Image (spheres, rainbow, N blue to C red):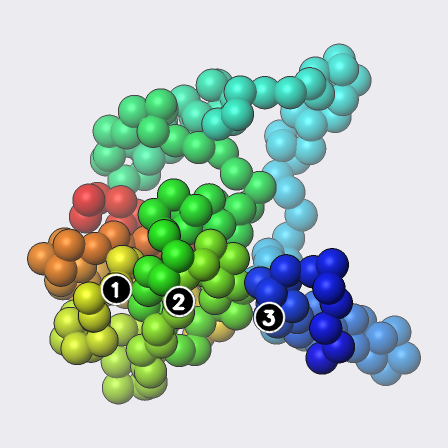
Amino acid sequence: MTSNALLSIRAEQTRPFYVMELLARAAARAASLGPAVSMVVGEPDFPPPAPVIRAAQAALSKGDIHYTHALGMPELRQAIAADYARRDGLTIDPERIAVTAGASGGLLLTMAAILNPGDEVLMPDPSYPCNRQFVNAMGGVVRTIAVDAMTEFQPTADQVRRHWGPKTKALLVASPANPTGTMLSPASAASLAQAVRQLGGVLVVDEIYQRVVFEGAPKSLVSLG
């Protein structure tokens, strides 16, 4: 890699998001060879709900597109709190909810809120590639926990305790996970939460795919807090 004096060391050390290159190759292949089943990116294969489309069109027509509260529209935050109450039986103050540009925006802000330079974050390997960049961007250090089929591709409480060090600040997991798709069982999630709490750290959970499952209606791990 050629060094650029105008760029920070952080920027030069950031790895490309190769998934987008694979997506472009898949699209080019489909154009020449016909439709293909894409398993490249984590996005639904169905369009937005019709009421959402109508509401967006109405907002554009009314010119209701100005700056909102920094944490998101109060009405939206109230609706999110109501959704947690309806689906998970949780009472969450809307003032504790922040609306971000996707889960990645939320994770980046979370790392900014909890990390000081040199703090370590544990995460499973494999995991979503961008998660490492969020930690690195805040001067943190990623420590990976190797997972496999024996652990259902999720870290165990024992592994977390073994990998936890004096500089460790947090454990970052996802359920369902990307790229493996595996979910933390209620018992496993509870044991992870207990271990991290006893170690004096922060458990960060990415639940972006929580509603995209084949069976059941998994509860949010927010209930463990």
Percent coordinates x, y for residue 6 in the rendering = 74, 59
Q: Which residue is mark 3?
A: 13
On-image quarter of the N terminus: bottom right
Tell me where residue 101 appears, x and y as whole percent.
58, 41
Residue type at mark 1 is Lys
| Residue at the top extreme of this rendering | 62
Q: CA distance from mark 3 to mark 1?
A: 22 Å
Above-or-below relation of 98 to 94 = below
Mark 1 lies on residue: 167
Q: What numbered label is drawn on residue 101?
A: none
Q: Nearer the viewer, residue 175 or 20?
A: 20
Nearer-N-terminus badge (1/2): 2
Is residue 94 visible in the rendered image? The answer is yes
In percent of width and height, residue 206 lies at 40, 55
Q: Pointer 2: what residue? A: 141
Is disc 3 placed on a helix, strand or loop? helix
- Whether residue 175 is visible to the viewer of this picture, yes or no, is no
Give the residue drawn at x 41%, y 22%. Answer: 78
Amino acid on which disc 3 is placed: Gln
Q: Is residue 24 above or below residue 74?
A: below
- Quarter of the image with the C terminus is top left
Q: CA distance from mark 1 to mark 2?
A: 9 Å
Q: Secondary structure at mark 1?
A: loop
Q: Earlier in the sequence, mark 2 or mark 3?
A: 3
Q: Secondary structure beneath disc 2?
A: strand
The CA distance from mark 2 to mark 3 is: 13 Å
Mark toward the start of the polypeptide (3 vs 1): 3
